[in-house]
């Protein structure tokens, strides 16, 4: 298990801490891709235009109330909500190590792009 939540302490321990988090991140990503990502893909693949134009009924985990709202904006929110959590992660990492790694999607794509052939 990764010690990512625990304070990394002095700067000399930060590199080991970040390597530990990186290993855990790789393992978690593989598990997510194998299970959760496929569930999402399967759900979205089954949606037709009528369903997307319809409504969704749900109950939040944190409250007993039931809600109903339009499906299309709910899907947009669902796919965009991860940016909120990315911001939370950036704040936590900045607090722990002083400078968080770049988490911006466009920078990630630029840094991971293959050289032009």
Image (spheres, grey):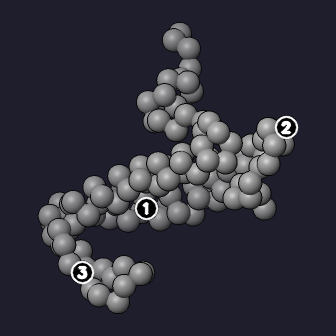
Q: Is residue 11 visible?
A: yes
Looking at the rendered image, the disc whose residue lies closer to the viewer, 1 or 3, is 3
The residue under the point 74% across, 43% down is 18
Q: Dot 2 corresponds to which residue?
A: 12
Indicate whether 32 appears above or below 101: below
Q: Dot 1 corresponds to which residue?
A: 40
The residue under the point 17% across, 68% down is 70
Depth order, front residue of 56/47:
56
On the image, the x and y values in percent for residue 52 come to 20, 63
- Is the C-beta separation of discs 1 and 2 under 8 Å? no
Task: Tell me if 71 is positioned left or right of 78 in this view.
Answer: left
Q: Secondary structure at mark 3?
A: strand
Q: Secondary structure at mark 1?
A: helix
Q: Dot 3 corresponds to which residue?
A: 67
Dividing the picture into quadrants, the one containing residue 101 is top right
The residue under the point 57% across, 63% down is 35
Indicate whether 108 appears above or below 59: above
Where is the N terminus found, in terms of image quarters? bottom right
On the image, the x and y values in percent for residue 95 come to 61, 47
Task: Tell me if 109 is positioned left or right of 50 in this view.
Answer: right
Q: Is residue 2 visible?
A: no
Indicate whether 57 appears above or below 76: below
The residue under the point 59% across, 58% down is 32
On the image, the x and y values in percent for residue 53 come to 14, 64
On the image, the x and y values in percent for residue 113 come to 53, 23
* N-terminal-most mark, 1 or 3: 1
Alpha-carbon neighbours of circle 1 within 10 Å: few (<14), some, or many (≥20)?
few
Alpha-carbon neighbours of circle 2 within 10 Å: few (<14), some, or many (≥20)?
few
* N-terminal-most mark, 1 or 2: 2
Dividing the picture into quadrants, the one containing residue 75 is bottom left
């Amino acid at each position: 298990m990764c010690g990512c939540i625990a304070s990394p302490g002095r700067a000399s321990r930060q590199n080991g801490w970040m390597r530990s988090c990186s290993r855990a991140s790789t393992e978690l990503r593989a598990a997510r891709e194998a299970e959760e990502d496929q569930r999402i893909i399967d759900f979205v693949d089954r949606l037709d235009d009528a369903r997307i134009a319809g409504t969704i009924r749900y109950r939040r985990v944190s409250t007993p109330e039931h809600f109903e709202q339009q499906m299309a904006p709910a899907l947009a929110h669902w796919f965009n909500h991860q940016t909120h959590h990315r911001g939370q992660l950036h704040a936590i990492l900045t607090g722990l190590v002083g400078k968080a790694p770049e988490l911006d999607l466009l920078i990630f794509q630029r840094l991971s792009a293959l050289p032009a052939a």
